[in-house]
Each structure stands twice: as structure tokens, then as C-alpha cells.
Image (cartoon, helix red, strand yellow):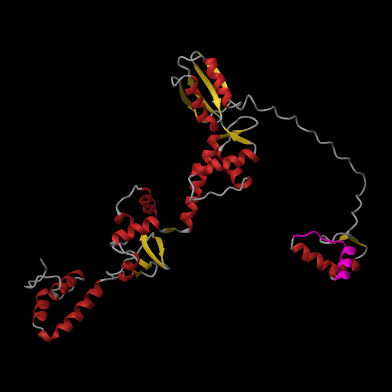
Amino acid sequence: RYACDCALQTRTCITAAISERCITQRSKISRQRISIILHTLPASSSSNQTITTKATSMSRRVGTPQNRIELSSVSVVKLKKKNQTFEVAAYPSKVKDFRAGVEADVDEVLQVAQVFTNTVHGVVAPKKQLQKHFPGLSIEQICEEILRKGSLQVSAKEREAETDKLMAEVTNLVASMCIDAATGARLAPDAVGRLLRDDAGFAPSTTKSAKRQALDVMKVLERDHGLKRAPMELRVVCGAAEPSDVVAALHAVDDDVTCTVKDASITCLVPPRVYRDIVTAVAKATDQKGSVEVVERAAVCEASTLLPPPPPPVKKPPKPSSKGPVAPKPRVLACNTCGGAFPDAAAHRAHFKSDWHRFNLARKLKQQPPVDEKTFEEEQAIM
């Protein structure tokens, strides 16, 4: 119930609106006086009442207008169709969840259930364009298509954070699956990260999974940087077959397989690339009665038993003591670009003004080796 006794009792009642305003501002004007004044206005003063209502509502509203929607933490998803770009405003984290199938509600993904042609300026796409490019689809279906097929625009900080997270995942995967080829020791993730960034020149890509990129970069590390893939430790149950026959079948698969027979089982270290062949060979040797169990995906040995002893320290010979004053070194006047030495300062200065020096400077900018003065004169004579 409104504060006044107006019979209209609606939200458009001028008396109620001004009465509430008076209560809010703690005005000393009585509500009865306001009601009498407004109810005695003639019917022709409706325009004046409308103006009074607008002025009152504008004075009460301080800040953002009610018909304006401000978007915060916005990621714009763009989809281009026939030289026309359509955009939707969404939450950055929710778009990835929606594409991964974690979030199914479009209203939780979009900040505004509307299609724009320019989200920054708030330009809404006309209905004719939407019907032309998306025939027979509703606004919600159009938003779903843009979210699934469009390109996600993120800020530089979000892109940098995503790249750092992907780099950490690749580094941890490589550190867990690689060992030193010389010692068989496992490397720390920090050392692997420095090796990937500084030596291998690896840069993560957001279009590939972390495991796929780790497998690709391990081939480069194995070829150029002295690392290798850690072997897998398997336990093979022979069943009714003879362990010696199974061991022979395993060695026939790859020469790097190392086997240890214990009772009716075999513990072996195999390269990960031949795992499927090992399973096939065991099944064939045991008539489908044997089994292969993975004990450890990346088996490593103790580094302390394989590391070579540190080399003895090398003693530097003592410097000969010089008695008496040291003679100063003679000053050499030379040109780092053209080479050669000059007898005096005048010849040195004249060289920097010569055509030969300018010619070698031009070759240096092109990353070409300099030419001597005789070759330069022969080329000038030919030209």
C-alpha cells in the first residue's frame, strides 16, 4: 500500500510517486497537502504531470540508466557469414565449458541473450539479416551456433595465463616421461622448462592438447638434447606356457627389451613404442592365456649408481711475477668492418670517408662478408 490515500493505487500514480520521494528525502511537506494539490489539477494538465513524473524519476535515479546494460568481463564470440559478422557477449570461462559439454544452459553462458553486429557499440543485428543468414532459427539457436562455431576473443592477460598453464602441463608431462640418456636419471620440471624455452625453442599451441605437444617435443629432445623416453615396466604372466618361450618372443619384438624371470611371471622393461607389439606377442606365445600388466609407465633407475665421479679440480699455473713497470700496449688503428691497420690517424680518418668503406658497410647490412681493397677496385673497374 502506498503512503497516500489515492484511489488509483498504481505505479503510475503521480501522488504515490511524489509521496515516496518526499518520504525518502524526509521532506517537511505533508502527504495530505500533496494529494490535494495533485487531485485538483485539471485534465488538460496531463502533459505537465508527465513532465513532473519524468523530472521526479530522473532526480531519484543517480547513476546508470535503467534501460542500459553494462557488460563486465566480456568475451566476444564472432561468427562471419557471407561478409557479415555476428557477435554475442559471453563469459570467458563459460564458453569453454559450453564447447566441452560441461555447461548446457545458454543463459548461463551469455551475458545478454541478443545477437550483435558490433558488441562494443551495442549495435543489435537486424531481424532481416538474422532471417537471411540463419533461416528458420530462433535467437537462442542462433546464439548456440555462434558459440559453437565462432572465434572467441579474449584479452591479452587471459591468453597469457592460458599459455602459461599449457606450458606448465607440457613441462610436467615431459619431465615425467623423459630421462637422461647417459645416466638414466629423471630431470626436474624446472630444468625441463628451461630446456624447452631456451634450447629447444618450444612455444605451446592452444589448438593441440598438452599430451600431443609433449610427445612431439620429446622427439626433438631425444634427437638433439641427449634425452630419451623412459621405458615401461611390465609384468607378464605366462600361464601354461614356458617362460623361456615367452622371453624369446619378447626379444624378437625389440632388442631393447630387458627381461627378468621370477616364478611364472616375467618382469621386463620395454620402450613405450612397442607396447602393443608386446601384448600381441604374449597373446600369441601363450595361446591367449597369458596377460600383460603395466607396473610403471615411466621406470627410471637410481642416478647415484650411474653418475660418473666428478673430475678432479684443475690447478691453474701461477702467474709469473713481473718486476718493474709494465710497458703500455701500442695503439692499433684498424677498421672492424673492412679489416687492416693504418699507420697514422690521418689515414684512419680518410678510410672512413672512402668508397671502399661505404661499400663494405652496405654488404654488412645485408649480412655479407667484406671484400678487400683490391677486389673492390676490380669490381669498380668492371662497372
Quarter of the image with the N terminus in it: bottom left
Compared with 188, 341 (above or below) is below
Q: Position of residue 54 (x, y in %)?
A: 22, 77
- Dividing the picture into quadrants, the one containing residue 128 is bottom left
- Dividing the picture into quadrants, the one containing residue 48 is bottom left
- In the displayed structure image, the side of residue 120 where residue 174 appears, left or right: right
Compared with 283, 28 (above or below) is below
Compared with 27, 281 (above or below) is above
Q: Nearer the viewer, residue 268 or 248?
A: 248
Q: Nearer the viewer, residue 377 or 302?
A: 377
Quick check: is 203 in the magenta stretch?
Answer: no
- In the displayed structure image, the side of residue 363 where residue 45 appears, left or right: left
* Residue 375 in view here: yes
Magenta stretch in the rendered image: 367-383
- Who's the residue at 31% across and 50% down the image? 104
Q: Where is residue 314 in the image (x, y as percent from the top left)?
A: 78, 33
- In the displayed structure image, the side of residue 216 where residue 25 appears, left or right: left
Q: Position of residue 75 (x, y in %)?
A: 40, 59
